[in-house]
Amino acid sequence: MSTRTTGAGTYAPRPGAAPLPRMIAAQAALETRLLLRHGEQLLLTIVIPTLLLVLFSAVDIIDLADGGDGGGRVDFLAPGVLALAVLSTAFTGQAISTGFERRYGVLKRLGASPLPRWGLMTAKTCAVLVVEVLQVALLTSAALALGWSPRGGPLAVALLLVAGTAAFSGLGLLMAGTLRAEATLAAANLVFVLLLVGGGVVVPLDRFPAPVRGVLEWLPISALSEGLREVLRDGAGLPWAQLAVLGGWAVVGLAAAARFFRWE
């Protein structure tokens, strides 16, 4: 709160909200700190993807299509684990945290603050992106130490990650804004496990029967993991088919979240 001078030695308050970008930045910094301080969230977003990458790259647990050498395994696994990191942060973690904020009335109170509701969601998205940058840096370092040799351009990778974040964020906010917090907790973790197994992360999609594979290929986690694999392993350009799938999920998820999200 600033002040203005009305006379010699006399001051009066001049109340008013801070500029909108400053409010969003402050809320995003707070959301980021809360995410990084949450032990269960760190386990889900950082520890589990890293352990999966190291374990499945070092030990031939699953017969991958890339051959039996460690380099072939990590070349297959690294893109899938990057997709899993986006899923864990943008969908699972955000759905659970937002669901409990809604249950305890935090969202209702924040919605009545000078920060508009769309600004609050923007801040949450910025916090998700910050955590994802940390995840990508950590997982990339671990994969390189395991012998990963990525190809492709960073622009295609960035577009895929942003599209995946938008798709999973929309679905996570839709779940958090429509279900009870306990149901969101159970459903988000269940979806995480199911997509880990059936989303092309650690198990190649060609291991599934053709009818099942045809359905799995339309999932956002499959589109993200396969798109990243085409770029980082095969050196392809922009994977337009996978970007289209992610874009479709993003539009549907964000539109549904905006339409059906309940703040209390």
Image (tube, rainbow, N blue to C red):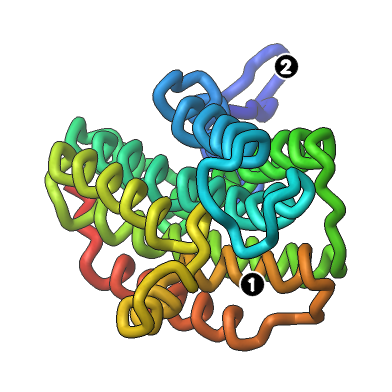
Q: Which mark sits nearer the N-terminus, 1 or 2? A: 2
Q: Nearer the viewer, residue 67 or 171?
A: 67
Decide if residue 101 is on the left or right side of residue 120.
left
Q: Residue 44's x, y, as percent? A: 45, 33
On the image, numbered disc 1 is attached to which residue?
Answer: 227
Q: Type of residue at label 2?
A: Ala
On the image, numbered disc 2 is attached to which residue?
Answer: 8
Residue 256: quarter of image: bottom left
Quadrant in the picture for the N terminus: top right
Residue shown at 40%/24% (left/top)? 40
Q: Nearer the viewer, residue 243 or 37?
A: 243
Mark sitting on residue 213: none
Q: Nearer the viewer, residue 179 or 46?
A: 46
Decide if residue 18 is on the left or right side of residue 87.
right
Q: Residue 190's x, y, as percent? A: 25, 47
Residue shown at 29%/42% (left/top)? 189
Residue 18: quarter of image: top right
Residue shown at 78%/64% (left/top)? 232
Spot the residue most to the top: 9
Q: Type of residue at label 1?
A: Gly
Q: Residues within 10 Å of mark 1 (few under 14, many from 20)?
A: many
In the displayed structure, 241 sits above or below 43; it is below
Q: CA distance from mark 1 to mark 2?
A: 68 Å
Decide if residue 139 is on the left or right side of residue 127.
right
Residue shown at 51%/49% (left/top)? 62
